Image (spheres, rainbow, N blue to C red):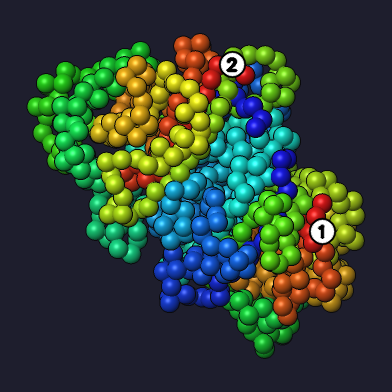
């Protein structure tokens, strides 16, 4: 690696069910201009742009980066468009960091977005494939059996999911940009909400959001000029595995385990649970919090649900998870991964406002996609490695 | 900068109406490229692919493609919703880090599964332009007319590019159109969209391609073999709004070529990704290529244009000639977007 990469600018939109006050370029510019303002830079200081979004079918625009080039100050610059399913926001940031780390460019703008109000994700996520039975159940229908398998394997009680739903929605009240603000959320409310895909109830699912995230990434020289403390990228990792094959552990996929271990090795982390101060984990359905805790090696196998039950993952707990409110409170699909990465960086820059975990020095950003098969992760720190 | 080389290539013969699945397309080219490079799957540190869902109207086409490459144990892998040439750029950058030494890039595109003229229209501004449904050929025709209006070229020049390209493909079994009528005959064809006649437009085809890349360390691990060393690579994008561009020039190609080091020495061969005949003339002028540079000896995109593959195919075709000793220094170009909006240039040489 020729260069160390640092995050010096972070911007997010105000996420909402529908940002019908903004076009797609307008949505992206809200995030981009905030990230540039945070870094005290302008589009002229940017050498390359890396953008990610989920399937083009969502908005019905083929390769939207082409049409967004002007709005994002990319004209005359290199522009890359990443698409790795739900992990895309994370892998987009990793590709952008790679341009800096390889010494190709000094300062890179990376963005991710989804404008779900202009699309129908459930339709786009339920395609019919030749020679394959249609699922026609969206993402929840795909993931619910994995949750049931986790419950069967660990004996976790039903209320664990409700607890995650309440925790993340209460955290979101401290995050002014979060889509869902539900001050009346309670275990009873979650329990009383309609069952969508056994055992996942309505309030245990992520919303459909319009939103975008942007980050300014730069090299060591750029970080020295940064007006605010940088978040140093201590490690990045990508892992993928096929969606289906006999014997595949879909509850705790090998790709996720390998990805986390590769990440910790790079970042010099030997005891992740102790060394990581806060984690932003991609949890679109409540049960994925305990499942990913185990997959990430942050909890011993079969015990993730106990950490939820004991408040370990609450903002006041030993390992706070998703103080931003997480995907359960904000889900512009293509941006959700980048929001995790950006929130992790905000934490180590002590920039998270009311949802700041005091004294956070090392933070994990996590994203996954496809049938729990694509993983993207990064670890950021307050101290230069 | 760390040295990285192309050490294996594979392109599927481009056909119309392929019934193969993504898995079948990708499996064929990845296995072939690995075999040519003498690389085992287990030696690959990074994978990167390029494709576009909208071509077949189905999300996540790259997910099923994963089944083709044996992603077990899990692999480090990424995907761009772009031509494979841009996936190759991402893999090249990854290899420059120094912790990754062998990468496979692959791409696939089945343009024949939809009405590609209409599908590509969804690349435009969805609020103001797409609702007018400017199709690919009409936009290319606007560019061609603008070029005629400069007085630099005539319709005969377009026909000459088409004739040369398709006759050059005679020996290329992977090309779809491998012969051409004479220029005078071509000029008798009716216009599809004035001033473009059928011969100035690309065929519609399905295809796939793969390229194996290695660093010097990677090559040491695998063992010496013919290699096309990447001397430089860059890509640049222009404004999307056609009215904001000079359609008869390609400043993004020129800038990418400068950044890739075109000025460091003459190239004896160029593979230009010009789906429409007038675009080759625009690219040639933008690059300032001298007369003696051989252009599109493969036949280029006028002979085979599997969308999402045709750009990577230019790099593969040029690399093969460098590896065979047929070119000392070659330029490969890939384009993306309407009317040459985004352009990539890769320069390769035979010796490290």
Report the residue at 41% width, 57% height from top. Answer: A70
Q: Quadrant of the C terminus of chain B?
A: top right
Circle 2 chain: B
Query: Between A286 and B351, which is closer to the camera in this rendering?
Result: B351
Q: Position of residue A157 (x, y in %)?
A: 80, 71
For residue B174, which numbered disc appears in the image? none
Q: Relative to B290, is B252 above or below?
A: below
Circle 1 chain: A
Report the residue at 56% width, 33% height from top. Answer: B105
- Give the left or right position of residue B324, taking residue B195 as reference: right
Q: Position of residue B242 (x, y in %)?
A: 29, 52
Q: Relative to B339, is B30 above or below?
A: above
Q: Relative to B316, is A360 above or below?
A: below
Q: Position of residue A150 (x, y in %)?
A: 76, 59
Query: Between A40 and B102, which is closer to the camera in this rendering?
Result: A40
Label 1 secondary element: loop
The part of the image, by quadrant, that contains residue B78 is top right
Report the residue at 45% width, 68% height from top. Answer: A26
Label 2 secondary element: loop
Q: Relative to B59, is B169 above or below?
A: above
Q: Is residue A133 visible?
A: no
For residue A383, which numbered disc appears in the image? 1
Query: Between B55 and B6, which is closer to the camera in this rendering?
Result: B6
Query: Between A213 and A178, which is closer to the camera in this rendering?
Result: A213
The part of the image, by quadrant, that contains residue A313 is bottom right
For residue B351, which numbered disc appears in the image? 2
Q: Is residue B303 visible?
A: yes
Q: Quadrant of the N terminus of chain B?
A: top right
The residue most toward the bottom is: A184
The part of the image, by quadrant, that contains residue B152 is top left
Q: Position of residue A182 (x, y in %)?
A: 64, 84
Label 2 vs label 1: CA separation?
Answer: 42 Å
């Amino acid at each position: 690696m020729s260069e160390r990469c640092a995050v010096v600018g972070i911007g997010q939109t105000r996420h909402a069910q529908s940002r019908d006050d903004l076009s797609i370029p307008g949505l992206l510019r809200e995030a981009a201009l905030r990230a540039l303002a945070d870094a005290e830079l302008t589009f002229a200081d940017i050498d390359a742009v890396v953008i990610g979004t989920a399937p083009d079918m969502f908005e019905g625009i083929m390769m939207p980066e082409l049409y967004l080039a002007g709005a994002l100050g990319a004209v005359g610059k290199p522009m890359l468009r990443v698409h790795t399913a739900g992990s895309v926001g994370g892998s987009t940031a990793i590709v952008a960091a790679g341009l800096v780390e390889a010494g190709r460019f000094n300062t890179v703008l990376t963005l991710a977005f989804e404008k779900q109000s202009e699309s129908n994700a459930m339709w786009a996520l339920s395609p019919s494939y030749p020679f394959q039975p249609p699922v026609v159940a969206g993402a929840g229908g795909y993931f619910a059996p994995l949750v049931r398998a986790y419950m069967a394997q660990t004996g976790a009680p039903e209320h664990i999911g409700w607890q995650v739903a309440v925790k993340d929605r209460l955290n979101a009240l401290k995050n002014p940009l979060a889509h869902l603000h539900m001050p009346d959320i309670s275990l009873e409310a979650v329990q009383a909400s309609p069952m969508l895909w056994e055992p996942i109830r309505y309030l245990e699912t992520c919303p459909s959001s319009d939103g975008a995230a942007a980050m300014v990434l730069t090299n060591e020289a750029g970080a020295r000029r940064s007006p605010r403390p940088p978040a140093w990228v201590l490690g990045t990792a990508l892992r993928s595995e096929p969606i289906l094959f006999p014997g595949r552990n879909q509850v705790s996929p090998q790709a996720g385990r390998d990805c986390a271990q590769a990440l910790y090795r790079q970042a010099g982390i030997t005891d992740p649970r102790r060394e990581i101060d806060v984690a932003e984990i991609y949890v679109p359905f409540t049960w994925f919090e305990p499942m990913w805790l185990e997959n990430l090696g942050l909890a011993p196998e079969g015990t993730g649900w106990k950490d939820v039950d004991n408040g370990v993952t609450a903002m006041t707990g030993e390992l706070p998870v998703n103080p931003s409110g997480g995907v359960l409170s904000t889900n512009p699909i293509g941006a959700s991964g980048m929001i995790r990465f950006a929130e992790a960086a905000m934490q180590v820059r002590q920039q998270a406002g009311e949802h700041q975990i005091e004294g956070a020095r090392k933070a994990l950003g996590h994203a996954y996609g496809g049938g729990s098969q694509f993983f993207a992760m990064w670890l950021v720190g307050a101290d230069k490695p | 900068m760390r040295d990285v080389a192309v050490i294996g290539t594979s392109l599927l013969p481009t056909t119309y109406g392929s019934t193969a699945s993504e898995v079948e397309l990708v499996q064929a080219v990845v296995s072939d490229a690995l075999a040519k490079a003498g690389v085992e799957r287990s030696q690959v540190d990074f994978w990167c692919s390029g494709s576009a869902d909208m071509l077949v109207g189905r999300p996540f086409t790259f997910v099923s493609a994963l089944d083709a490459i044996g992603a077990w144990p899990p692999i480090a892998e990424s995907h761009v919703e772009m031509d494979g040439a841009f996936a190759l750029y991402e893999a090249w950058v990854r290899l420059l880090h120094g912790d990754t030494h062998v990468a496979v890039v692959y791409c696939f595109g089945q343009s024949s599964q939809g009405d590609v003229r209409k599908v590509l229209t969804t690349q435009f501004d969805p609020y103001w332009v797409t609702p007018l449904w400017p199709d690919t050929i009409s936009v290319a025709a606007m560019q061609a007319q603008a070029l005629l209006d400069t007085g630099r070229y005539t319709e005969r020049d377009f026909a000459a590019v088409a004739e040369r390209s398709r006759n050059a493909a005679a020996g290329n079994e992977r090309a779809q159109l491998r012969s051409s009528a004479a220029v005078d005959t071509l000029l008798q064809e009716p216009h599809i969209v004035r001033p473009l006649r059928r011969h100035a437009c690309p065929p519609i085809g399905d295809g796939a391609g793969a390229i194996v890349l290695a660093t010097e360390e990677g090559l040491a691990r695998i063992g010496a073999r013919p290699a096309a060393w990447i001397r430089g690579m860059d890509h640049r994008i222009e404004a999307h709004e056609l009215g904001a561009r000079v359609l008869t020039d390609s400043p993004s190609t020129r800038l990418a070529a400068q950044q890739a080091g075109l000025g460091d020495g003459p190239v004896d061969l160029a593979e230009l990704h010009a789906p429409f005949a007038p675009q080759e003339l625009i690219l040639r002028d933008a690059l300032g290529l001298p007369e003696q540079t051989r252009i599109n000896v493969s036949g280029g995109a006028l002979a085979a244009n599997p969308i999402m593959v045709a750009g990577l195919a230019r790099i593969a075709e040029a690399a093969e000639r460098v590896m065979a000793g047929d070119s000392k220094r070659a330029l490969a170009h890939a384009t993306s977007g309407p009317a040459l909006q985004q352009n990539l240039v890769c320069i390769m040489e035979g010796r490290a």
